Image: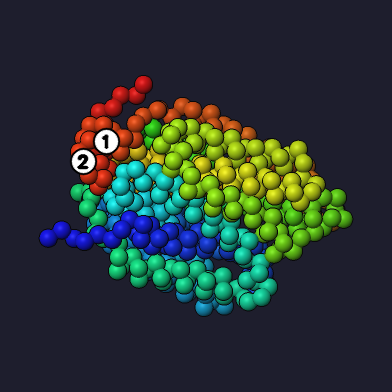
Amino acid sequence: MAEKRIHYGATFVVLATAALAFSLLQSLIIPAIPQLEHTLHTGTSGANWLLTGYLLSSAIATPILGRMGDIVGKDKMIVVVLITLSVGVVISGLATTLPIMLIGRVVQGAGGAVFPLAFGIIRDEFPSRKVAGAIGVMSAILGIGVGAGIVLAGPIIEHLSYHWLFWIPLVLSLGATVATFAFIPASPVRAPGRINWLGASLMSAWLVVGLLGVSYGPTWGWKDPTVLAFFGAAIVLMALWVWSEVRSDSPLVDITMMRIPAVWTTNLAAILFGFGLYAMFVTVPQFAQTPTRVGYGFGASVTKSGIYLVPFAIAMLVIAPLTGGLARLFGSKIVLVVGSLFSASSYAVLVVAHSQPWNVYVAAGLLGVGMAFGYASMSNLIVEAVQPDQTGVATGMNTNIRNIGSALGSGIATSLVVSKLLPDGFPVEHGYELAFIVCGASLIVAALVALRIPKRQGPSAVAAESHPGLTAEGEVFVGAIAYTREETP
């Protein structure tokens, strides 16, 4: 007897709760870093490791666990990921010293695999006509959670304590864990093979040393010998990783898949898109908190500076459900181009005018619209380009590449802001303007790259034309096979 499967709408609620827990944990810590320096008796570099360690762990875990989900079953692996995430949250929530909290943050990074696993489950379980929209909303939840975390961090710190930065996401994580175990059905599509652990180790190594270079570049200087050594080592390790994957009969990441035109162009757009986006979460709160006596800024508190990003979260929430329909009408490629241009326009607003609060509100709203379009379309372009048993690792790598771009963008933006300081220690206004210009330019280049993405039919559309009597579940699988026969116009 066939396994009874719950309605796809209920599946989506469970997956969205898991995704929101991870995305909140990613950003709630950012406004709290100055307070944690004093509470945990550490310096700025030590406290910043609470974010860096989380990003490094996520970068390593996401593609590996995504691949394991393709092999052993996405339903089983997402439960393991959520349990790991919850354990990490408990460790950090109970911590009173930096080393213990950092251990918890590193464990939490495994939660990054929630997104590629969720994309795979959506592809397996949803009717083909609903896949693009569901992936769009799921992708947008990452941005919504990041924006909400920055907004909520101030009130939580002021009225509760830093421990609640972890207890609140823990409720979501535990709820999602129980619901996933109880309701998410077994994966119908799995990939044969094993994990290439040499490839996994080499990939982890180049990601770690590369992100270390990005993390320390702003404080040590981009020409510092150690920073340059990090980047040089990352290039060498990446070459060794590619060599290992090409020679393996069961690669962690199929390099042939990564060379698919629709995949590599989307990934190139992703790193440029990520470069331009995350920097706003770093620069805008700092800009808003600058005292007005300096000649710019609004003298806002931690709580008030987060409120300036509320239009971002609202725009993400409103626009995300529309992305699936727009992708069906115009194609995910056009949606990505438009998203990149909307995001670029947000920085254009800040370059031209940033003396009034409404300037920041408008810019944040434009960024929310652009991010909703961009995140949704990139995930859909990857899903459309690869076979179902590659969904986890392909979307995991795309997420990683975008995160690398975000880390690089926020690091360079920070360097530009602090490149010249006033006598009282505050950055000069021009540093912010230069950071806004560079981030906006990156997003314009992302739009140009997106125009080069081959225009192809997605798997579901091909399946619908080639197999008109096929069920919705079968459309997704057969469509991916039919897709390989499509010619690029």
Q: Is residue 213 visible?
A: no
Binning the other alpha carbons within 10 Å of mark 2 as few (below 14), some (14 to 19) or many (20 upward) gives: some
Q: Which mark is residue 327?
A: none
Left/right of residue 312 with respect to residue 287 in the rendered view: left
In the image, what residue occupies the spot 74% across and 64% down?
301
Where, by quadrant of the figure, is residue 332 drawn?
Answer: top left
Q: Residue at horizontal 50%, vertical 48%?
A: 320
Along the line of sight, the residue nearer the viewer: 436 or 43: 436
| Disc 2 to disc 1: CB gap under 8 Å | yes
Of the 4 image quadrants, the one containing the N terminus is bottom left
Label 2 to label 1, Cα distance in Å? Answer: 7 Å
Mark 2, secondary structure of its residue: loop
Binning the other alpha carbons within 10 Å of mark 1 as few (below 14), some (14 to 19) or many (20 upward) gives many
On-image quarter of the C terminus: top left
Residue found at the very far left of the displayed protein? 1
Q: Name which quarter of the figure residue 352 lies in.
A: top right
Q: Mark 2 sits on what residue?
A: 470
Residue 71 image position (x, y, % from top left): 24, 53
- Measured along the vertical axis of the image, is residue 113 above or below residue 250? below
Residue at the extreme top:
489
Which comes sooner in the sequence, label 2 or label 1?
A: 1
- The x, y position of residue 158, in whole percent, is 68, 73
List the residue tagged with mark 1: 464
What amino acid is labelled 1 in the image?
Ala
Task: Please state which of residues 242 and 476 is positioned toward the viewer in this rendering.
Answer: 476
Q: Secondary structure at mark 1?
A: helix
Vertical arrangement, residue 388 with respect to residue 341, above or below: below
